[in-house]
Image (cartoon, rainbow, N blue to C red):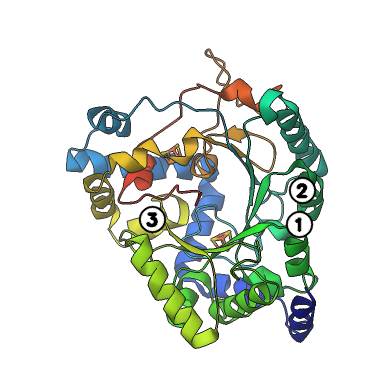
Amino acid sequence: MARASAAASDVQSRTSLIPETLEDMEADAELKEHLAALEAAGQQALTREERLKRQRSLDALGAPSFYATCAEAGVAPLKRSAARIFQLNIGLYCNQACTHCHVESSPRRTAEQASRDTVDRCLDLLRSDRAAPGGGTITTLDITGGAPELNTNFRYLVEQAAPLGLEIIDRCNLTVLLEPGQEDLVDFLARHKVRVVASLPCYSEDNVDKQRGRGVFERSIEGLKLLNAAGYGVLGSGLQLDLVYNPGGAFLAPGQSKLEAAYKSELGGAYGIVFNRLLALNNMPIKRFADFLTRKGAMKDYMGLLVNNFNAAAAEHLMCRETLSVRWDGVLYDCDFNQQLDMAIEEGGKSGKQLTIWDISSITDLTSRPIRCDNHCFGCTAGSGSSCQGQ
Ligand code: SF4
Ligand code: SF4
């Protein structure tokens, strides 16, 4: 711990990445146009339009629906199992504004933040699950965002959840560790044995900065060094550090084990960095990445790539089967992707009412419900998929 504190003091003089991110957003004509369209048409209209573009591409390819493809491959009906992972998207505020962000995060997303009420209700559900006979079904609390650590309730949530004995995951963008006011964040995470799952789409500075913003690679390396200094990724420390790769363009993630070996050799050789596992995930054809595909005239080819690489084994292990995804305002979803497309878990019957954390008495209320799939789901079943939870 002392080593982490010393390393933290080295970076105390670092300034926030946010001004650079905002400058880059202003200078990025494509992103500006996308955000202007979002503002003019509204999130829902743009989501509908995006869905239509995916569907037109699939129709042009003569591809069957996702459900039909699963059925033909003999994949069991897509129903929710007992939830094992409780994933809270605590808010969309982020110090970065990555080009492929599927949640449209940036420093401008200040409004969408989980309140103390939302966090307390999530904790109530988790506590009653743990108190259920046999210790309940939830094993993992997965906290995502945005940059989750920048939500004012993040540390409260971790502190309150830690005594429940769950695995706690922080989906960390690494640069947040260097934000002013976060100097003790690494110590905090280590103290509560939080597993850090961190995005680093390449070991090359150019590729990372192109996808995630100016200066992000250098700050990410600094962040990784702080984590290593606290014991993260170090054999026998009990502090797990996993990295996440996603492709820099319209292609599928390569095989995980070869890529992990390359990351370990490159990051270890150049910077002395160690980590546990690399998770290689595909880009989902939604939100900013869908916009990128449309601009490049590549939506049809990308959807074709996903369909042609349908993998029945990945379909059997979709995260939606055992994840409950909760939005910052408490609305419930089968997964984080559905959350961004506003495909909520709905009340039965014809009401179409979106269920929230306040509508259920226990997490098991949702077991056996059908999963809401659509044409974006091909992103989860291509190659090794994009909904791996790294378990
Ligand atoms: S760090 Fe993550 S949440 Fe933030 S903009 Fe990038 S992809 Fe989105
Ligand atoms: S997008 Fe969500 S609902 Fe669709 S297959 Fe992937 S995890 Fe399941």
Looking at the image, which residue is at 49% across and 28% down?
80
Looking at the image, do the residues carrying marks 2 and 1 touch, with CB atoms under 8 Å apart? yes
The x, y position of residue 172, in whole percent, is 62, 62
Q: Which mark is residue 282?
A: 3
Amino acid beneath label 2: Ala
Decide which of 325, 257 is in the foreground and name it.
257
Some atom of ligand 2 lies within 8 Å of the CB belonging to the residue at label 3: no
Q: Write the residue at 28% across / 54% down.
A: 302
Ligand 2, what quadrant? top left
Mark 3 and 2 residues: CB-CB less than 8 Å, in contact?
no
Q: Viewer-proximal residue, 48 or 124?
A: 124
Question: Pointer 3: residues within 10 angstroms few (<14), some, or many (20+)?
Answer: many
Q: Three-letter amino acid code at disc 3?
A: Asn
Residue at image coords 23%, 29%: 72
Q: Is residue 260 left or right of residue 169?
A: left
- Residue 192 numbered tag: 1
- Viewer-closest of 109 and 266: 266
